[in-house]
Amino acid sequence: MHFTSEQRLDSGVLEREFTLGEIPGTLWTPESAAPAPLILMAHNNGLPKREARLVARARQSAAYGYAVATIDAAGCGDRPRSAADEQARADIRRAMQAGEPADEIFESFIGPLVEKVVPEWRTTLDALLSLSEIGGPVGYSGWTAVGIRLAVVEPRVVAAGFFAGGYVPLAQREEARQLTIPLLFLLQWDDEGNPRQRALDLFDAFGSRAKTLHANLGGHTGTPWFEVEDGDRFFGRHLK
Amino acid sequence: MHFTSEQRLDSGVLEREFTLGEIPGTLWTPESAAPAPLILMAHNNGLPKREARLVARARQSAAYGYAVATIDAAGCGDRPRSAADEQARADIRRAMQAGEPADEIFESFIGPLVEKVVPEWRTTLDALLSLSEIGGPVGYSGWTAVGIRLAVVEPRVVAAGFFAGGYVPLAQREEARQLTIPLLFLLQWDDEGNPRQRALDLFDAFGSRAKTLHANLGGHTGTPWFEVEDGDRFFGRHLK
């Protein structure tokens, strides 16, 4: 893990860019000297790690006391995309703009993407936990499909907050039943691209006994800011 | 309003019993000298104001900084019940134990009860706001059916937290569309006596633009304690 730049924010949070082999990432650590619990924060497919909403959430959670890390995993963000990936993304955009069903394209694109992405998150987790300023335990926040798979294969992830705003492949909808860690599931009630009933069914399917659903009125990008603070407190109950 | 007893709790909260005409009530006020915002806290029909879960929540919210008041309204808690009310409650218990539909009995019993109860809450609100230690604004917490009607007729109620655990009469399901105040709607995902889809439909119906649903796994009485703290913060955003 090589740090390539750093800046100290007004909150005292240290924001550092890093590379880990081909993986570019950002790490935010709180000012406190004690080893911090870690939150892995993943955007839904395609959005870059530098996207403003993710950066704002990461900075807030780091100021609250967590180490927060994100990466552009394979095929995501600013990483190179294959011609097939570009085609799939174009097909999805066209189908959604035309109001046509996009489930089959999503399944054929997001399913394999999850398979590619999760190993890179695990590699990143190994590297992060070797840093003296990060102590664990580890939480996960964001992209639901990747988070389900990661939590199923990775015992070091002990709590997760999922955003119900993206397509979840059939494999992960099945794996949801295997999850037993505490979950906070965040739903935008009128999310344009995410059928509400499918999200409610997924919440129902999670095997966790400690699971909480937060739903707010509004579309995909309308999540109220107080949900970031609720998320910080959720992790505060479980990352100890 | 006559105070009949008082005790100072370890948290500094002052807990006082009062009567207002025929209405018995309890008022919790925080230690702070400044006039406090007020939360009206109503249990679902039948449960007395002295019930342990309500008392624990009220004490917590008063320690957080709110004045909290509850009453045994007409036909509720320790207030006298008519023979017809006793019969209706017995019919409901028998139907539910037998697994039979109880909607018609609920409708014929809870509908008129809401009509009787809400004027007593308004009378209580008048008296409470005349106290120097209570400044407003006013929030409402608890029994959904009464809260909907109260918020529709009472402009002094500016935010409400509803517990989706009781029968909501058809009239209040219609009135829900008229609500515009910020709402926090609390649902137990496996509530034995409360059909989940009906609760989700009610959440959908509320006219408020700022509405949030919190759902937790478990039955009617299984709401996690952190929801009391979430409720305090919800009111903190709106009772200013």
Image (spheres, coloured by chain):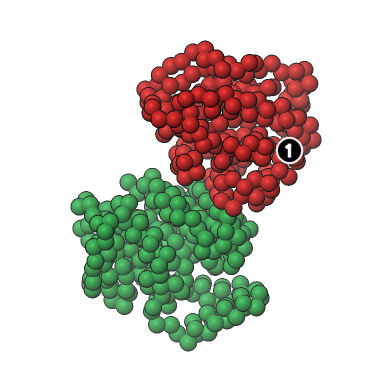
Chain colours: A red, B green
Residue B224 visible? The answer is yes
Query: Between A42 and B101, which is closer to the camera in this rendering?
Result: A42
Compared with A117, A23 (above or below) is above
- Could you tell whether B89 is left or right of B195 in the image? left
Compared with A174, A57 (above or below) is above
Q: Position of residue B22 (x, y in %)?
A: 31, 78
Report the amino acid beneath label 1.
Pro
Residue neighbourhood size for the residue with mark 1, other residues' Cα within 10 Å, grouped as few (<14), some (14–19), many (≥20): many
Query: Between B193 and B154, which is closer to the camera in this rendering?
Result: B193
Identify the residue at image location x=54%, y=28%.
A129
Q: Position of residue B3 (x, y in %)?
A: 23, 71
Residue B203 visible? The answer is no
Q: Position of residue A69 (x, y in %)?
A: 53, 27
- Could you tell whether B31 is left or right of B100 in the image? left
Among the 4 quarters of the image, the one containing residue A98: top right
Chain label for disc 1: A
Among the 4 quarters of the image, the one containing residue A159: top right
Query: Between A27 and A45, which is closer to the camera in this rendering?
Result: A27
Residue carrying label 1: A169
If the image is split into quadrants, where does the N terminus of chain A sit? top right
Identify the residue at image location x=47%, y=58%.
B162
Among the 4 quarters of the image, the one containing residue A33: top left
Identify the residue at image location x=54%, y=35%.
A138
- Could you tell whether A231 is left or right of B49 in the image? right
Q: Position of residue A226 (x, y in %)?
A: 45, 40
Identify the residue at image location x=34%, y=60%.
B59
Query: Between A106 and A207, which is closer to the camera in this rendering?
Result: A207
Q: Residue furthest top?
A: A4
